[in-house]
Amino acid sequence: MTKMNLKLLKNRAKEEIEKVKDLKELNEIFNKYLGKKEELALILRSLERLPKTKRMKIGKSANELKNFLKIEFEKKSQEIKEKIQKEAEEKEWIDITVPGEKPVLGHLHPLTIAKRKVEEIFQVMGFSIIEGPDIETEWYNFDALNIPKEHPARDIWDTFYLKNGLLLRTHTSPVQIRHMEKNNPPLRIIVPGSVFRHEATDPSHEFQHYQIEGLMVDKRISVANLKAIIGEFFRRFFEKDVKFRLKPDYFPFTEPSFDIGISCVICNGKGCSVCKKSGWLEVAGAGMVHPNVFKASGLIPKDWQGWAFGFGLERLAMLKYKINDIRLFRSGDLRFLTQF
Ligand code: PHE
């Protein structure tokens, strides 16, 4: 073995190390040159057979080569590792200065917003919020409200009858009876809740909607009280002065009965498509509680007076937010809902 051979070995190894692309290849070459049974090891082992001076010389060069190769391998391996790391960083690079993605936050449904507003206004005026069942008996929905079986008014409130004889309530008025059965006047309540009608849907009718029932009972209650409360409610709900009127109407459970109309909040009473050019919008039914309703609730009619009203919540919300189709509320259409 000569010095020449070592030099050749060094050059060959250097060249091969340079060409290496990954750690696996580098490992193979490492073993090839520095492995126990490989060339350099053999050279070192064969030194024993050489005369001392030569042995020292070649031994020294061989050791130098061994160290040199170790350093080269180490350098290369470092280089490859850095390259891998750099590539990974480029791929997974995060720009922390980019604005974050905003999480989509939920919000209240427009009907819930309107309902809470109505509740708040009446609570401030001393009314309690009472609820009743969506599934009713014929008695509470009709008979107790002075609508006996063959009464033609049952046609106005056609509903969904269940197989067990119960029905989906057509209005929140049954809760008047339920509440008066269990509570003694004076009473001031509002009753928000779902009601159901067996009828076709169109831009202003749905087979399911919300009502807000109102009931006030005491010794001396008159239409003047009704007008005062309703007027205050409109002012606070629409946040402006709203003209309103009571028109004679008919409900079996009130006498006299009224239709409550407000001057159109869209055109301020001038006449537009929403109010059908009349300048007025009907928003509620109302009236003085009928003696038969007191009787059905277990109260003595001559002892008490009261008024009741029933608002359609959708109608109120449509006027407040200028919505032209009642079906939008339950459409689940986010383009509509995200506007509130
Ligand atoms: N319950 C009636 C309806 O649904 C409205 C109403 C309530 C009328 C209270 C008078 C008194 O049409």
Image: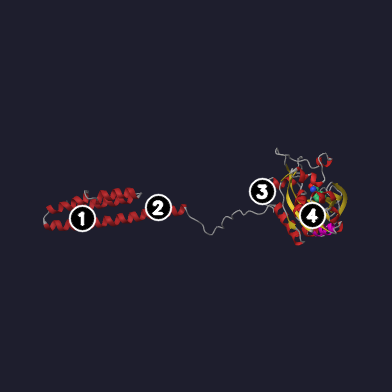
Mark 2: which secondary structure?
helix
Find the residue positioned furthest to the left: 51
Measure how far apart labels 2 and 4 are at the Cα level. 77 Å
Point out the stretch of residues depicted in magenta.
225-232
Dominant secondary structure (helix, strand or loop) of the stretch shown in magenta:
helix
- Residue position for label 2: 84
Which one is nearer the viewer's eye here, 301 or 53?
301
- Residue position for label 3: 334
Q: What amino acid type is highlighted by mark number 2?
A: Ile
Sequence order check, earlier mark of 1 and 3: 1
- Residue position for label 1: 62
The residue lying at 40 percent from left, 52 percent from top is 84
The answer as to whether callout 4 falls within 8 Å of ligand 1 is: yes
Sequence order check, earlier mark of 3 and 4: 4
- Residue position for label 4: 215
Sequence order check, earlier mark of 3 and 2: 2
